[in-house]
Image: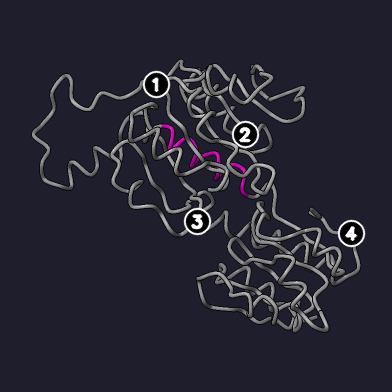
């Protein structure tokens, strides 16, 4: 079978792909254009896309004589793929859950600490040459230990964040989830509404899936429910947060700060956000570790190989 891989991947992944398939590896790091997406659907049995490769309804409609039968997504999030349109076009979609859980939770903790303790602001101060030395009231931030964290979305990643917050920092955990969660893995309290969760916390972490159902879930009203000293962390998808509303909340100091690993229109980051000193900005580093990206690629290939061998797909969506 012919396999198309849309981006550079770790070499062990490419070696395994080449051993199992007639493989073409795109070396460009930017997302595929719509023309490239259409060509991939027409020319390959399996396509291994990732974040930013937009397989929308119009993409499937534009493809003629579709050859592709599987989109083996590299990543747990698949809001860049219209799964319904893919099914209507006769192809399955898989993802890579599990491989990303701990790494993404680690980045959440990184952002919690960086935002609460003003680490990015302090690093900029040192680099600027303007630091005048330690003093007792310099850059006072939020002490994290013993505080309350609200986790919005208690899936695999939400539970991993809860474990780190509870066991590592003695934090009280509250959470909001669309369905009831019987066991969060740590002592935790599920609250009935998003606003109740955000109002209860010193730190709010967004860990919901992307997609139309969660777009702008965190808007002006949700941000207004937060405590004035509280910090918002987003490691989910950028468009879960209304970026304009967040900028206004940060600019007016209605919340204490924010830590972001994702953005509404990646890789575009608004100048108004960049200009603020009370937000930490990372370039989507959630799974950026070699062993994690290798594991993700191997999981994507597990799905592709199972399909090629006529076996059940390990990770259908």
Q: Which residue is mark 1?
A: 228
Give coordinates of residue 217: x percent, y percent.
60, 37
Q: Which residue is mark 4?
A: 312
Please identify the quarter of the rendering in which residue 188 is found.
top right
Describe the element under mark 3 as helix, strand or loop: loop
Which numbered marker is on residue 265? 3
Taking 277 as reference, is 105 left or right? Answer: right
Residue at the (69%, 69%) spot, across then down: 48
Q: Which residue is mark 2?
A: 158
Instruction: Classify mark 4: residues with Cα within 10 Å, few (<14), some (14-19) or many (20+).
Output: few
Q: CA distance from mark 3 to mark 4?
A: 35 Å
> In the rendered structure, which disc, 2 or 4, sits on the residue that comes first in sequence?
2
Q: CA distance from mark 2 to mark 4?
A: 28 Å
Give coordinates of residue 223: x percent, y percent.
49, 29
Q: Nearer the viewer, residue 291 or 161?
A: 161
Q: CA distance from mark 1 to mark 3?
A: 27 Å
Most extreme residue toward the left, as rendered? Answer: 132
Instruction: Classify mark 3: residues with Cα within 10 Å, few (<14), some (14-19) or many (20+).
Output: few
Mark 3 and 4 residues: CB-CB less than 8 Å, in contact? no
Give coordinates of residue 259: x percent, y percent.
42, 39
Taking 55 as reference, is 66 left or right? Answer: right
């Amino acid at each position: 079978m012919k396999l198309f891989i849309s981006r550079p991947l770790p070499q062990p992944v490419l070696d395994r792909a080449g051993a199992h398939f007639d493989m073409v590896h795109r070396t460009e790091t930017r997302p595929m254009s719509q023309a490239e997406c259409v060509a991939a659907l027409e020319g390959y049995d399996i396509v291994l896309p990732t974040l930013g490769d937009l397989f929308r309804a119009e993409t499937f409609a534009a493809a003629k004589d579709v050859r592709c039968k599987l989109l083996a997504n590299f990543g747990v999030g698949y809001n860049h793929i219209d799964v319904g349109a893919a099914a209507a076009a006769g192809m399955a979609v898989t993802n890579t859950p599990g491989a990303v859980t701990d790494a993404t939770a680690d980045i959440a903790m990184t952002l919690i600490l960086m935002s609460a303790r003003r680490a990015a602001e302090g690093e900029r101060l040192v680099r600027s040459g303007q630091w005048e030395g330690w003093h007792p009231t310099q850059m006072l931030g939020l002490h994290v230990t013993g505080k309350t964290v609200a986790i919005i979305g208690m899936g695999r990643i939400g539970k991993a964040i809860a474990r780190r917050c509870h066991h590592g920092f003695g934090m009280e955990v509250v959470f909001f989830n669309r369905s009831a969660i019987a066991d969060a893995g740590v002592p935790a309290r599920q609250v009935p509404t998003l606003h109740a969760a955000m109002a209860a916390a010193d730190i709010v972490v967004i860990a919901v899936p992307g997609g139309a159902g969660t777009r702008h879930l965190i808007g002006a009203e949700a941000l207004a429910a937060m405590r004035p000293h509280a910090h918002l962390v987003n490691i989910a998808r950028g468009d879960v947060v209304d970026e304009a509303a967040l900028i206004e909340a940060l600019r007016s100091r209605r919340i204490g700060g924010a830590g972001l690993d994702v953005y509404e229109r990646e890789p575009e980051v608004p100048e108004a956000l960049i200009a603020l000193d009370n937000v930490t900005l990372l370039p989507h580093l959630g799974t950026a570790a070699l062993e994690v990206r290798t594991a993700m690629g191997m999981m994507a290939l597990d799905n592709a190989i199972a399909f090629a061998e006529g076996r059940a797909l390990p990770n259908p969506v």
